[in-house]
Each structure stands twice: as structure tokens, then as C-alpha cells.
Amino acid sequence: MRHIENVDLAEVAEAVGTPFYCYSVAALIRAYTMFGLAVPAGSLIAYSVKANGNLAVLTLLAEMGAGADVVSGGELKKALAAGIPAARIVFSGVGKTKAEMTLALDAGIHQFNVESEQELLALNDVAAATGKSAPVALRINPDVDAKTHAKITTGTSENKFGVPIARARGIYATAATLPGIRVVGVDVHIGSQVTALGPFEAAFARIVDLTKQLRADGHAIERLDLGGGLGVPSDPKSYGKVAARAVAGLDVQLIFEPGRALVAEAGVLVARVIYVKPGEGRTFAILDAGMNDLIRPALYDAHHDVVRVTGTGEGRGVYDLVGPVCESADVFARDYEMPALEAGDLVAFLNAGAYGAVMASAYNARPPAAEVMVQGREWSVVRPRLTDDALIAADRIPHWLGP
Ligand code: LLP
């Protein structure tokens, strides 16, 4: 694979240097369109900004009519800056501060997904103080195992997220008494990179049961936020059917918070081979991208397929693909069979559009990978690589040190 759409990755590498992320507009449009067709008509697709918060990606999604799921004041500002209307923004997360709540109330967002009674009371204080009432869904922890990696499981009682389903009715009763709170819905999110539909089915069923109870208790539940979590590869159509079946006859607005499903497949991370180093019984291909650029393999044992983009080596080889960072965890893949690699070759990690660039750091004083967007024959840098000087300039030396 040498091209993304009609752009030659080798040309981009020459111009911007490596490593860099590359996003395809066509793939983003395809993923968003397919998801939209898969879920019931009229659903709000609140793209989970954390998956890829690049302003160019957000702007494209905004133009297609997406909403946003944000988890910080920063993400809220980014979503608004990209032109996503506040009325299509939901605010999730376990630790919203009062400052963030104020920001979101002033903006007039669609919904707060509240994750604890403590947060509910804080939000009530903030809203009531300015005579507002905050539209709220409680995030329910349904105690369903999403059958994904432990570090991206959120819906079991072991996890910090949401309120236990057994306590939900009590907290809704409290919410109904608070002047700064307007109960509008119920929210659930069980984890990420979920590829089996069973866990979604189980979680949605619990949420629907709860909704019926809450309505019987007198709460006006008009919306169900079914969260994100759909993994890649997976089939949005079947997922949409599971959701539609679960809520049949309920008369609610559905909200979805897909992150990965919209952006993962639209992105690659391109790196150059620095050395091919023979070891005892294994060969290391040392790349100029490291765990600071793409941490998913180190953190979640994630697998990203790797392809050779340029290279003239003949036959195939088996490599441990590693980065230059001084950590044994800086490994992308072990015993990976692919076309023979030589120093100078370009390789690309696939499905790197989600949780790649956003999780990058400057560890080892390595400025994170640049980001590029491609449309047809055109490409554009959507985030330049920071310079070493810019990294240095970000630090400050206290007055009692130095000359
Ligand atoms: N909604 C909430 C409340 C979430 O916490 C998340 C993801 C999403 C939606 C979007 O989930 P998605 O559709 O992207 O699966 N860094 C990890 C994934 C962390 C997901 C955190 N929450 C990874 O690289 O796999």
C-alpha cells in the first residue's frame, strides 16, 4: 500500500518527515455515513472527540452534521471551535469540575451525562446559582462485561464509571427534587473496542428495563444515550439493529457516542525503518515511530497490522517491530511476517486513526508525529510536528537556577 486516496505516502514523508499520521477524508465520510445509515433515523450521533480531536477531523464531522461527546472543557471548546452546535453536544466523564460545568451550561449543551450523586449535587449548585436547569442523564453502570481488554472495560462494578444500576432509582428521585436539574434521559457505555454484540444487547436491555421503571416512577425519560464502544472491525448495521430492537416501542431519542468506529480505519501511522538489527533468534526492525506516538500496543496489547509502503527488499521477513524509545514496552508487534525490510523503507500501521495521535506524548523529548489529511489528490498538514526548540521553550527555569 503506497497511497491514501490518490496521495503518495512517500511524497508526504519526503515533505513532512516521519513519523506522521495520515487521515483519509473519503474513509471518514464513509464511516460516518455507514454509521448514520445503521442506527435508527433521527438518532443523535455524538462523535466521541477523545478518539481523534484534530480540528480538521472535527470540522469534517461537523459539516456532515455530527454532534459530539466531550469529556473535558478542552474538548468542549474544540468541538465548538469546529462548528459543532452546542445543542448536539453531550458531556460525559467522571470528574467534571464546576468550572467545566459552567462552561457547558453557558454554551447550552444538549445533555450532561452525570456519573455520581456527588456530581449531580455539584451540577445542581452551579446551574441553580445562575437560574439555569441542566439537562441530565445519569450514566448507569449495568454490570455487564464488555469482553474487551481490561483497561478499556467500563461497565462492570469493578469500574469507576457510572452509578450502580441498583441505586439508579434512588438517585433519579433525588434529581427530581433539585431545581437546577432537569432529568431527560438515561446513559450507558460499557467499554471500547467491543466487537461482540452480546454485551451491547445485555446492557441495552437493562437500560430499557430501567427506563420503564423510571417512567413509572414519574420521570420524563425522553432520551437514551447508548454510548460508544463499537470496535473495529465490526458491523455497524448489526449493531444498529441490536439498538433498534432493544428500544422498540419506547419512543425515545437515541444518542450514540461512537469514537473508534468513525475514525480508526480512516488513519494510518507512517514510519521509517531506521535499522534492521539481527538479534538472537529474532530480527528487530527499529522504526522512527515509538510508543510516544502510538501507545496502544504497549498499553492494551493492541494489534495494528503493518504494511510496507516503500522498499525494494525481496521476499519476506519476520520482525519484531519496535520504536526507538528506551523502554522494553516500546514494541508494536512481535514475530511479524511481512515483506522484507531494509533501513530507509517506509511502513504504515493501519487502523491508527483512533486513539493514536490524541494519546501521543513527547516522552524521550520526541515531538509527537505530525498529522496530515488527504482528500483525493490533495493533502494538507493538519498538525505540524512540534520542533525540538518548541519543546525546550515550553519549560521554564526557576529564578534561583541558571546563570
Ligand atoms: N463514550 C464514553 C463515555 C467513553 O468513555 C468512550 C471511550 C466513548 C464513548 C467512545 O468509545 P469508542 O466508540 O471509541 O470505543 N484509548 C483506548 C480507548 C479508550 C476509550 C475511552 N472511552 C484505546 O486506544 O483502545
Image (cartoon, rainbow, N blue to C red):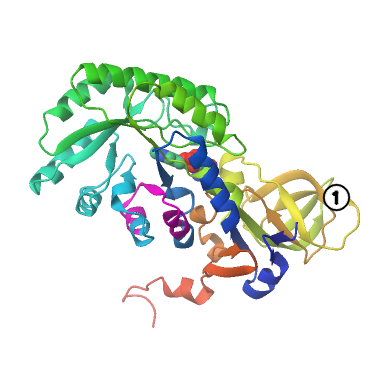
Residue furthest right as drawn: 314
Q: x, y percentage for residue 137?
A: 27, 33
Name the residue rendered at 27%, 41% in the picture: 112
Name the residue rendered at 67%, 48% in the picture: 332
Compared to 48, does 252 lie above or below? above
Compared to 234, does 320 lie above or below? below
Residue 101 visible in the snapshot: yes
Point out the image quarter for the N terminus: bottom right
Name the residue rendered at 66%, 46% in the picture: 304
Which quadrant of the view contains residue 124? top left
Segment colored magenta: 58-77
Cβ of mark 1 under 8 Å from ligand 1: the answer is no
Residue furthest bottom as drawn: 403
Between 102 and 272, which is closer to the camera in this rendering? Answer: 102
Secondary element type, mark 1: strand
Find out whether residue 69 is within the magenta segment. Answer: yes
Point out the image quarter for the C terminus: bottom left
Q: x, y percentage for residue 306?
A: 72, 50
Q: Is residue 138 left or right of residue 324?
A: left
Residue linked to disc 1: 317
How many marks can you see?
1
Q: Is residue 322 left or right of residue 192?
A: right
Residue 148 visible in the snapshot: no
Name the residue rendered at 23%, 48% in the picture: 101
The amino acid at mark 1 is Gly
Packing grade of label 1 (10 A; few <14, some 14-19, many >=20) is some
Compared to 147, does 340 lie above or below? below
Q: x, y percentage for residue 315?
A: 91, 53
Find out whether residue 390 is within the magenta segment. Answer: no
Q: x, y percentage for residue 384?
A: 53, 70
